[in-house]
Structures are given as C-alpha cells and as structure tokens.
Amino acid sequence: MTVWLALDLLLAAGSLALAFGVVRARRVFTAIALFIAHGLLLTLAWVRLDAVDVALTEGAIGAGLSGVLLLAARHRLARVGAGRVAEAPGRAVTIAIGLGCAAVTAALGYAVLALPDPAPSLAAEVAASLAATELGNPVTGVLMVFRGLDTLLEAAVLVLAVIGVWSLAPDRAWRGAPGAPWTVVEDGPLALLARLLPPVGIVVAVHILWVGADAPGGKFQAGAILAAMGLLAWLAGLARVPPTASRPMRATVAAGPALFIAVGLAGLMFQGAFLAYPEGLVKPVILLVEFVLTASVAAALALLVLGPPSADARP
C-alpha cells in the first residue's frame, strides 16, 4: 500500500465519519463544526483529484461561507425561538429524509458510472483556443471568454437575489441594516478568530484573484473568502453593516455586472459581437472585470447571508 493510497483511504473514511457525525450530532453547534470540518476534508479530496479550482470553491463556499451561514442561522433561530421547545422530527420524517438522500446519492453515482470511457469533453478545443485569450488558466478562459455570457448572468443573478432578500423586510425596517445586530465578543475562540483570520483571509483572497488568470483561482473563490472574512467580523460584533439605503454598498453590489455589461456592449459596437474583447487588450480587460466582479460577489454573498433588514437594526 503506497502512502498516497493510504492518504486517499483516510480522506474517504474521515469524510464518511464526519458526515455521519453531522447527522448524529445532538447539538446544533456541534453539527455545524463537523460540517465545516467535512468541507475541509472534501477540499483535500478535490486536490487529490487534481481539481484545484473545485477545491478552492469547496473550501471557500462549501466550508467557509456555508459554515458562517449556518452559524448565523443558528443565532437567528435562537433569537426567534427564545422560550420555545424545539420538536425533533418524527421517525417517519427521518426515514423519508434518509431515503431521499439515498436516492439522490444513487442517481449521482449512476450518472458518473454510466459515462462512456473516455467521457465526452471539450478540453481539447479549449486548450487549442486558449492562446487567443492571453490567459493561462483554462477555467478562467471558459468563464470569461468562451462562456462569458453565462458568467455575466450568474453575476446578475446575485444582484437580483440581494434585491429579492431585501424585499422580504417589513416597511418599518427597510432603512435598517441587513441582518440582526450582534454584541461584541470580548473573549473566546470566536473573538480570537475574528481578529486573526480577516487580515490573512484578505491576503489569500487577493492572491487567489491575482493568479486566477494563469493558475487555479479567480473572482468567485476570492469573493467568497472576502465575504466569509467580513461575516466573521460581523459575527463577533466587530463590524457594522451599512444600511440598505447606503449608496456605496448598492454601487459595490451592482458595479461588477454593470462593468461586465458595458464591456459587452463595447465589444458589440467596436468588434461586432457582444462580449468580444479588443485585440491586444484581452487580458487587461478581463482582469479589470474580474477585480470589480470580486468586490460585487463578496458584497452580494455577504448580504445574502445577512438576510433582510431587521426591525431592531438601525442605520
């Protein structure tokens, strides 16, 4: 048995054990902590499969941002359900959920195993045309050039999602800050992490964004890390969220998609096709769009986790 095979077996066994622990955990906080650890193990598993871009996404969103989202949901439910006794789901509901998860797992497994060998792929076509994009990372080339319209629509969906979440706020809370207010945490692991991790996370996010043109990384992973760092400071009560009426915050959310649309229209006017980049300036224009999109993605993801403005939040 080689070292790498032993590592793969440990990753598989650890992932299954953590998944079982999440399901069997009696306390919500314990389940969330195990879920975050499970996401980190999956990140290592994707690295072992040479899918570094997927690993970065899993680490930033599957473990980091999702973990913060679950912690915020736990806090919100604790505030709303104060004084209530939570009822555990009955045996029939538990069995139904288990059967549903098993059915989804079986369907995904069949879909993967039923693929022909070799599986259909456009990787060769992308590699042959990548030089024209002036980019070294084929994933960035696909997202920003070959399927740039899809990426634009994804960024626009984030803006629409923020608008949809804000629309759930009652009229009296509309001008308040998104999310419930948090008291400042003076000590404990959350206070320590909220003070130590954000500076490191910002540096990591900038690095992932900068190298994304030529190596695994990019705007979505960097934006998710920035959002998680901001939310961590918010959870510890160290950062205040601007009110929904804040023009700078609204501009940050909309700036990325707006610039992307402007670049697309410029390509239509001067190159004859929507999202056609000017010859000789492909990489600089893409980097400019990615930098602005990163800020928009980070702001939108954080606002989606925060939720609608609450009645007890004041601008």
Image: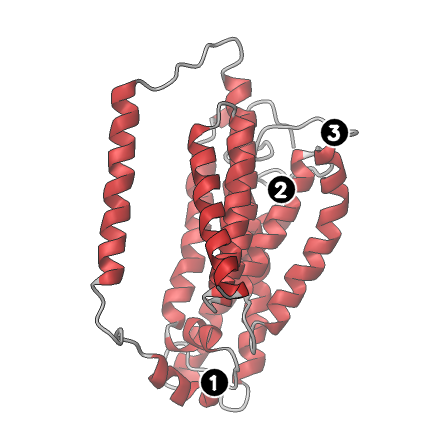
Disc 3 or 2, which lies upstream in sequence? 3
Q: Which mark is residue 133?
A: 1
Q: Residue 49: image x %, image y %?
A: 45, 66
Q: Do we see residue 107 in this rendering?
A: yes
Judge whether 82 appears above or below 209 on screen. above
Residue 142 image-quadrant placement: bottom left
Considering only order in the chain, which callout, 3 or 1, is on the residue closer to the N terminus?
A: 1
- Mark 1–mark 3 Cα distance, whole angstroms, equals 48 Å
Is residue 157 placed above or below 274 in the rendered structure? above
Label 3 neighbour load within 10 Å: few <14, some 14-19, many 20+: some
Asked whether the residues under the numbered discs 1 and 3 touch, taking CB atoms below 8 Å apart as contact, a structural biologist would say no
Among numbered discs 2 and 1, the one appearing first in the sequence: 1
Counting from the top left corner in percent of width and height, residue 240 is at 69, 37
Relative to the observer, which residue lies in front, 59 or 26? 26
Tag 3 residue:
185
In the rendered image, the quadrant that contains the C terminus is top right
Mark 1 secondary-structure assignment: helix
Tell me if 12 is positioned left or right of 295 in this view. left
Front position in the image: 78 or 308: 78
In this rendered view, identify the residue nearer to me: 250 or 302: 302
Give the residue pinned by disc 2.
Answer: 231
Q: Quadrant of residue 75?
A: top right
Density class for disc 2 (Cα within 10 Å; few <14, some 14-19, many ≥20) is many
Q: Residue at x 59, y 31 (%)?
A: 176
Horizontal and vertical percent for residue 247? 61, 48
